[in-house]
Image (cartoon, grey):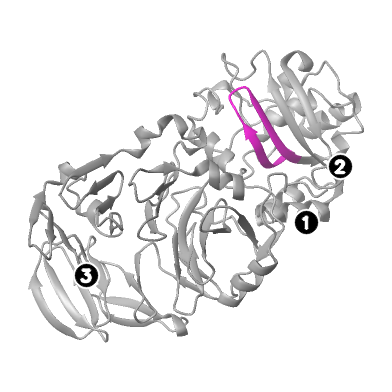
Amino acid sequence: MATQIYELDWDDTPAGKFRLSKPEIVAYVRHFGQDTNELHEFLTRFDFDEWVCMELFVDYIYGKSTKSGEVGSDAVQYLNIVSGTFFSEEAELALHNYIGYNNNRFEYNYDGSPPFATFPDCPLWVIQITSQEKQSSSAIFFMPAIWWKEANMTSESYADSHFTVNSKWNQWYNDPFGKNQHQNRYWKNRIGSYSPNFIARESGSTILFNNYKIHFDTFRNRLLIQESQLEAMSYYNLSDFKTEHKTQNFLKDSANGFIESSADGYRFYTETKLLVTDADFNVISESASKVVNCYEDDFWKIVLDNKGVLMTKKESGDEKRFKYSELKLTTSAFSNNPDSLTIYVNANRSVIFFEKQLSIVDTSFTVTNLNLDSLFKKEIAPYYYDNGQKRQLVALSAERQLLLTHNGVFELGSDEKPKLINQKLKEITGEVLFYSAIKDDALNGIWFVAGIDRLVFTDVNFEKGYVFNFTEQDLTDKYFNDYRWSELFLDQDGNLWYSLFGPELKKIARKELESKLKTAVAYAPKQHKTH
């Protein structure tokens, strides 16, 4: 039966050998960032001393999960294939006895978003989905060796009826390929490849910001926590970040307010006024204001208010007011404030507005509106469906900018034509989800927060990539499967601060970044193998 449905190939030594002890399993999956509490709970729940680890390549011939033959990549799917293809009668009996003859089907865990181990009663852990297409897939996984028993390929099995999901209404794969958020989350968590590199966060060096907005003041190496409901505003001097300071909350009752910092002090914009203070938060002036965002350099002055967008060329005084709709922006103050909408001027002195869409206004006030999702619809991989993350513009230089979006990473050059660079980044890092980025001028490269809590470094030309697992790995945060509101910045001492799952900034010391990068191994496509 199995050989009539699938064409199969396999590698039985992705971890260097086929049979592994429990410590060897832990040592191997650490290189995928998966040495977590969830893994240890899994190894405790299925308490076996010996495990088998393999990579299985599956080509679906006649169709299995949908009428069109489209397939999934979850643990039950692979257990079905393995048990229907390789199990000896003794191994199948052992698995039946473990699961129970009257409880042979699995239930998805739908309490919130799917956790990493989607099936609490399934004895197979998928480490990495190495490929996923409509009619084929491959994955590296491990399972208890007692259910293997040196089996040879067989052609008949009861797996089809025994090792499936309990109800057809409880399956991910009734939806079109790549169009189910639960399937995609499971899939995306297992794309990152094997990496030999590890890096340590500085122990105890965290700052909690409780889902509030943050503002990094580069002039004073200071972090301000924006919260509109509290009487006081917290801030931290990053040279002594364990001491919390408080001052008057100039943005109280202004959820869409924002802060500008300068060498002289601060400008606090609320929905109704502008307060200017010195560096010690002493008020210098207060005036009425409807500004929701602004930008100014030696050429442009740009103001967004309740009437639209006013753009002024400072030398000539030429100006033009645009309606928000002309730049494909909403009238929402939330969507137009600096935390959501980035304004940047490139080497051509064109103004870039980047939020849900990309709008570019050149020096003659000519507008170009670009919907990246529509323009690159055919090139965007299915696993980006229902991906949630903060959109960010990262300036590599006045000639080059990166646009991080829920559909991947785009690059803008001096020709102002966006290019999708997902595939290039995947080729040099093995990762596909990049949540934040910052250029490191001293190292002439770019740091990314990517995948399931991994740090990635690339050169500025994207020729080589280095992927780092953290020495302490924890994916149990309650926000793990939610929106990735990632923050990332380098402080004045070159220390890297980042957040990914929850409202907590974590510090990686400069000396750690530099020393680990010197000895790091660049990513290679077959790096998930240890032999």
- The residue shown at (55%, 25%) is 173
- The residue shown at (63%, 26%) is 165
Horizontal relation, residue 14 to residue 385: left or right:
right
Where does the image place residue 131, in percent across and percent down from the top left?
64, 34
Q: Dot 2: within a 10 Å radius of its alpha carbon, few (fewer than 14), some, or many (20 or more) residues?
A: some
**Residue type highlighted by circle 3:** Lys
> Main structural element of the magenta stretch: helix, strand or loop?
strand
Q: Helix, strand or loop at disc 3?
A: loop
Give the distance between the C-alpha atoms of the residues marked 3 and 1, in whole angstroms: 49 Å
Of the numbered discs in the image, which one, if any, rests on residue 343?
Answer: none
Of the numbered discs in the image, which one, if any, rests on residue 27?
Answer: 1
Q: Helix, strand or loop at disc 1?
A: helix
Mark found first going from the N terminus, 2 or 3: 2
Give the distance between the C-alpha atoms of the residues marked 2 and 3, in whole angstroms: 60 Å
Q: Dot 3: within a 10 Å radius of its alpha carbon, few (fewer than 14), some, or many (20 or more) residues?
A: some
Q: Name the residue under label 2.
A: 18
Asked if one can make out residue 440 in the rendered structure from this viewpoint, the answer is yes
Asked if one can make out residue 113 in the rendered structure from this viewpoint, the answer is no
